[in-house]
Image: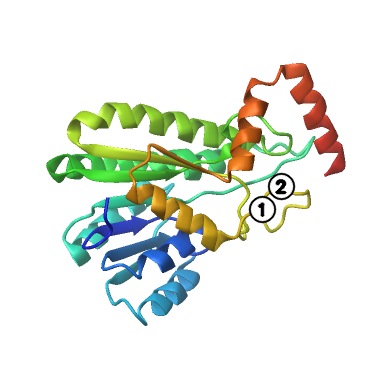
Amino acid sequence: MKFQDKVIIITGASSGIGAELARQLSKYDCKLALLARRESLLSQLQDEIKQHNNNVVSIKCDVSNRQDVIAAIKKAINAFGKIDIAILNAGVNIRTRIGEFDSLAAKETFNVNVVGMMHFFEELIPKFRNYGGMFIGISSLADGRGFPLSGLYCSSKAAVTLFLESQRIELKPLNIKVITVKPGFIKTPMTDPNKFKMPFLMDVKKAAKIILKGIEKEKRTIQFPWQTVLGAKLLRIMPDPLFEMIAEKHRRST
C-alpha cells in the first residue's frame, strides 16, 4: 500500500501516536482528515501540517457518538471525494484501584476503544466495498492478560484485537484489508501519568515510523518492540498462578 494520492482519516489525531502519524504522513503526497474530540489541539496540528501540505482538514469528532462519526466521514468525503484508509487510533485508558471500580468508566472505555472503532467499520464498509480500502486498528500488546489496575484497558484492547481479526477474514473477499497494530509502551500523554516502570518505552516518532512501514508492507499484524512482543507471548502462555504472583507484586509496587 502506497500513501501517495490516498485519502486517509486518522482518529485520535490530536496527540500521541495519532498526531505523530499525521505529521509523518503529511510528508507524502496524500490527503489527511484529522479527527479528535480536542478541537484546539487538532487545529494546532492542522496549522502545523499546512506549512508543507495543504491537503488536510480537521474535524471535531467523538468516535463513541455514531452521529459524530457519520458527520465526520461525510465532511472528509466532501473535502476529498472519498476515503481510502482509516487509521482508527482513538483510545482512552482509565485506571481503577480496589474499591474505586466505576461502571461509567467502563462504559466510556469500551464506547471509545471498541464501539467507536466499530462505528467506522459500519459506515465505511459499504463505501470500501466499491473500490477496496483499508482499516488500521490500534490495539495493544496488553491485550493478552488482565493486568491489575488496567482491567478496563486490557479487556477493551482484547476485544479490539479479536474484532479486527474477525473482520480481516470476513472482508478479504471484498478486497478490504484490515491491519492490527499492537504497540508496547510508547511515550505519549496517555502513558506519561504512569508511575510504574515501563520496560522498553519507545519514542513516539520511532513508533509511528514502524507503523507506517508495516502499513506499506500490508502486514496483518504490526507489533513492537520485539522485546515486549516476546514478553507478551511468554505472559500469555504462563500458568495462571505464576502470572498472578507476578501481577500481585506489580500491583503492590504501584
Q: Is residue 176 above or below residue 209?
A: above
Q: Residue at x 52, y 38 (%)?
A: 110
Q: Is residue 79 left or right of residue 207?
A: left
Residue 213 visible in the snapshot = yes
Q: Are marks 2 and 1 in contact (CB under 8 Å)?
A: yes
Q: Disc 2 marks which residue? A: 199
User: At x 61% / y 29%, what residue is drawn?
Assistant: 233
**Front in this rendered view, residue 101 or 131:** 131
The quarter of the displayed image where residue 31 is located = bottom left
Q: Nearer the viewer, residue 208 or 120?
A: 208
Please state which amino acid type lies under the numbered disc 2. Pro
Q: Is residue 70 left or right of residue 208?
A: left
Residue on which the image places disc 1: 201
Q: Residue 105 location in percent, x, y?
A: 62, 42
The residue sitting at 56% across, 42% down in the picture is 109
Q: Quadrant of the C terminus?
A: top right
Q: Quadrant of residue 253?
A: top right
Image point 28% across, 45% down: which residue?
134
Relative side of 52 to 194, left or right: left
The answer to whether any part of residue 16 appears in the image is no
